[in-house]
Image: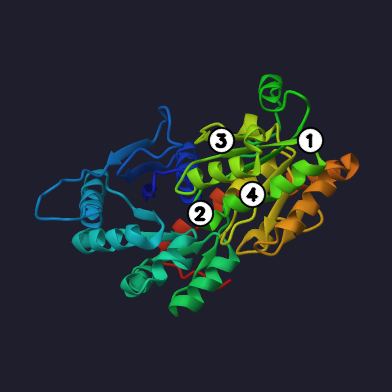
Amino acid sequence: MKIGITCYPTYGGSGVVATELGKALAKRGHSVHFISYAMPMRLSGFQDNIVYHEVEMSSYPLFDFPLYTLALASKMVEVARYEKLDLFHCHYALPHATSAYLARQILQETNIKIVTTLHGTDITLVGLEPSFLAIMKFSIEQSDGVTAVSRFLKEKTLTNYNINKEIEVIPNFIDIEKYRRTPSAKFCANCAPHGEKVLVHTSNFRPVKRVLDVIKIFNEVQKKVESVLILIGDGPDRSQCEMLCRELGIQEKVRFLGKQAELVPILSTADLFLMPSQSESFGLSALEAMACEVPVISSSVGGLPELQVHGQTGFIAEIGDIDRMARYAIDLLTNPSKHALFAEAARKRAMEFESSKIVTQYEQHYERILGNVSIPAK
């Protein structure tokens, strides 16, 4: 198959999944074309069967805002015609599925198909804005195939938008061979020189990720357990987080590493992963931690209860319940045998989301769409 993939290239779960899916499809012999305004972060180095096409943006004094949706549609038309694509796979409905619909209208002679994968905030936040609601519903319903990364997200989509469309749940996935615990003595000595317990959080530091809660949880933990906190990522809340660390007097125990391409060495040092999010459609970063044998303390939102098992791979608490999450963390960090059982269970659970199984589901979804076979409801 010849597949055009459009995604946000930034540091976030949807872009990571889209890029890893494209790389896996290319290894299976499919021709994959990434179409975006920048090179996806995980798309590094040459790989057979993968081509990147940059969406070029023009700036005119007449336009106050960039016309990305139209520029993307135009580039999709160009790539589809020249490369003879079979389908567009859009990760995030807005604006990608909208641009794909415009491109298909121009490409009527090709009968190109559109698959849209829903990842989270496109459904739970952005699309609910009155100015976007109608176009969100239209773009999803005009897609030939629609997938969601969790049952939670599927139900939210059907309920919020009254969608008249079958949605197939295909969860996020992980390369189990890449994401495995491989401790680095150098990194351990660097981040925890005195053998402290290591807590980790990864996100884009948006308010919905509640990184301030991560710091407050750690503040309670470090009072009982010698520990350090490693924060990976960057975003609008970072300055506020740094300020909170200074106010609490724990700045020496908290390390802000910014955006990191290689997470395995860091996760392999971790004892716990914290994810107290306000909204989480799946929780890819938690899955990456679990694959590295790191138990997860998370909130009970979205698709997280579908991913981790309370009392086995980690613990789940209500949003904002900092005290309970801190108690769960202290319990695991002070009980080595219990921690070992949870770490083993986390790895075992992560293996259920092994990439080859999930990529096959996407291939089968493509084949049904290209064969004009209806998708059974799930």
* Whole-number angstrom distance, CA of label 3 to CA of label 4: 13 Å
Tag 3 residue: 256
In primary-sequence order, the first of circles 3 and 4 is 4
| Side of 300 where 173 appears, left or right | left
Q: In which quarter of the image is residue 9?
A: top left
Q: Name the residue under label 1.
A: 226
Question: How far across and down, in percent of the image, does residue 219 sit?
Answer: 70, 45
Three-letter residue code for mark 3: Phe
In three-dimensional space, the C-alpha distance between marks 1 and 3, rounded to whole angstroms, equals 18 Å
Taking the spot 70% from the left edge, 45% from the top edge, the residue there is 218
Asked if residue 252 can be seen in this view, the reply is yes
On the image, which quarter does residue 361 sit in?
bottom right
Identified by mark 2, the residue type is: Tyr
**Label 3 to label 2: alpha-carbon separation:** 36 Å
The circle drawn on residue 216 is none
Dots 1, 3 in contact, CB < 8 A = no
Question: In the structure shown, which secondary structural element does the residue marked by tag 2 occupy?
Answer: helix
Point out the tag, 3 or 2, that comes first from the N-terminus. Answer: 3
Q: What residue type is labelled 1?
A: Glu
Task: Please tell me whether mark 4 sits on a helix, a strand or a loop.
Answer: helix
Reply above or below: 39 against 161.
Answer: above
Q: Which of marks 2 and 4 is in front?
A: 4
* Direction from residue 120 to residue 33 in the image, left or right: left
